[in-house]
Amino acid sequence: MLQKQSRYVLLVICSMMIAGAAKAEGAISRVNNSGDLKCGYVEYRPALEQDLNSKEWKGFNADVMRVVAQRLELNLKFTTPTGWATVVADLNAEKFDMLCSGFWVHPNVGKFALFSRPIMFQPVFLVVRSDETRFSNNKDLNNENVIMVALEGDNPVNIAKSDFPKTKILELPNMTDFSQVLVNVEKGKADFTIVDAYTFGAYNANNPDRLKILNTENPVRIYPVSYVFHKEDVLLRDAVNAALDEMILDGTMGKIFDMYEEYPNAYYRAVVPYNNPYNGQ
């Protein structure tokens, strides 16, 4: 029943005229004509990775997109690897229909592409050495004697410049393995970094009790995580949004992320807001 309803929603959306749209054709035409939804992807654990033996795609992005494709009655295909910096260019070149790896929503990228509704929200935290006692709150970090470490050009650099303008920033080359950021904190070459709870949890599992999150109740930032579409592919974006909303409301999305809740505070659940006047509250 849900599949039939979603198919109906897709057909209705595809028949709508979008006022002011500059593009009548696009990914939605390719998808409808072929029946295939071709995904660009970035592999990273636990979001998306391909088993080298079975060739099966695993991770929460694979699970979410399988359900989306099922409800839109499309064949899901992970066809083209891409990179965070090349997503927009590859969409413009029509190398794939959408990016099926969760992408932190950035206003600057929003000038050149469309984002889906968030599939979840990801908090990032301050991480320091486990024996660190100098920092009782975030204000203590804004000091010219404090060093923050991050990958060159990565989001934590911008956060530090905004929130801790006096702090020195140690930037490692962009292609450095991210674990080295945490190693620099552990070894005392830097005083803190900014990282998501999953990355911290994975490092802590292999290097127990060497680092700690400074305040789990106060993330430095919370990022919406969405899929990305060509700037003119409104119809495809809205069709995928209809499936994502349905998955959130019927509990499917929550069940998927429950399977990947390996470390606490890794993912904040997305909701579709509404008010039920009959619940007695």
Image (cartoon, rainbow, N blue to C red):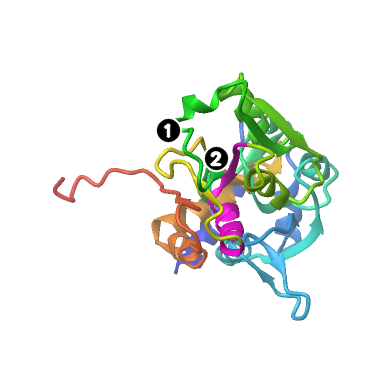
The magenta-colored residue range is 191-206
Task: Say which of 53 and 279 sits in front.
Answer: 53
Give x and y (percent) for residue 22: 73, 31
Would you identify the image quadrant in which residue 156 lies?
top right
Q: Within 10 Å of the Cα at label 2, are there few (<14), some (14-19), or many (20+) other Cα atoms?
A: some
Task: Say which of 9 and 226 sits in front.
Answer: 226
Task: Say which of 123 and 241 sits in front.
Answer: 123
Is the residue 160 above or below the residue 104 in the image? above
**Can you identify the residue that label 1 sits on?**
136
Q: Residue furthest right?
A: 93
**Can you identify the residue that label 2 sits on?**
223
Would you identify the image quadrant in which residue 149 lies?
top right
**Residue type pointed to by label 2:** Tyr
Give x and y (percent) for residue 273: 37, 43
**Residue at horizontal 61 percent and vertical 19 percent from the top:** 166
**Residue at horizontal 50 percent and vertical 66 percent from the top:** 4
- Locate the N terminus by quadrant: bottom left
The stretch drawn in magenta includes residue 162: no
